[in-house]
Image (cartoon, helix red, strand yellow):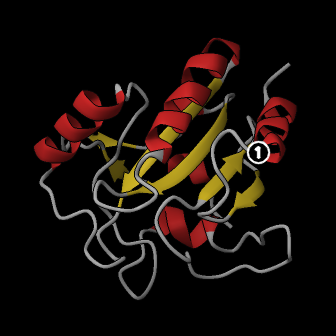
Amino acid sequence: MSDIYDIPIHTLQGEPSSLGSLKGQAVLAVNVASRCGLTPQYAGLQKLQDRYAARGFSVVGFPCNQFLEQEPGTSDEIAEFCSVNYGVTFPLFEKIEVNGPGRHPIYDELTATPDAEGESGDIQWNFEKFLISPEGKIVGRFRPGVEPEDPGLVAAVEAALPG
């Protein structure tokens, strides 16, 4: 298992990056889409970001077009949509694949983690969430139907906060 912080990825703006700048924080990694019935979850994700950022927490979004092509936009279109419609301030990365032979290496790590029912493997749909501890361990997996403000998800975030 590689260190999830060291896996290269590009920002939504195309700059080389990684999750390394978030080492020491609790991170909620989410595959996102702009044209999905679950897209309003962006609002709840931003609320989590606003509520916990000062305590060492960040949401990170990974746009993905693998589910009924619900994220067809360019990087600029995705950024504008998220900003204008949901006031998103958390980091968004390049559009990636989360399943199949083109799966991004970050999602190779994430999908090995089981959910509450013990199921690991492929992402089911947009807005599947993974909680990463400040030490880089994947400590929770929440399926797409789990809203960002779900009490179980909020409790897990609070438990993962540093300090």
Quarter location, residue 27: top right
- Total labels drawn: 1
The vertical placement of 131 against 33, above or below, is above
Q: Residue at x 63, y 11 (%)?
A: 54
Rendered-image quadrant of the N terminus: bottom right
Q: 18 or 153: which is nearer to us?
A: 153
Type of amino acid under label 1: Leu
The vertical placement of 98 against 44, above or below, is below
Residue at the spot of label 1: 153
Q: Is mark 1 on a helix, strand or loop?
A: helix
Residue 7 at what x, y percent from top left?
Answer: 48, 55
Q: 119 or 109: which is nearer to us?
A: 119
Q: 113 or 136: which is nearer to us?
A: 113
Residue 89 at what x, y percent from top left?
Answer: 39, 24
Q: Which residue is drawn at 65% across and 55% down?
A: 130
Rendered-image quadrant of the C terminus: top right
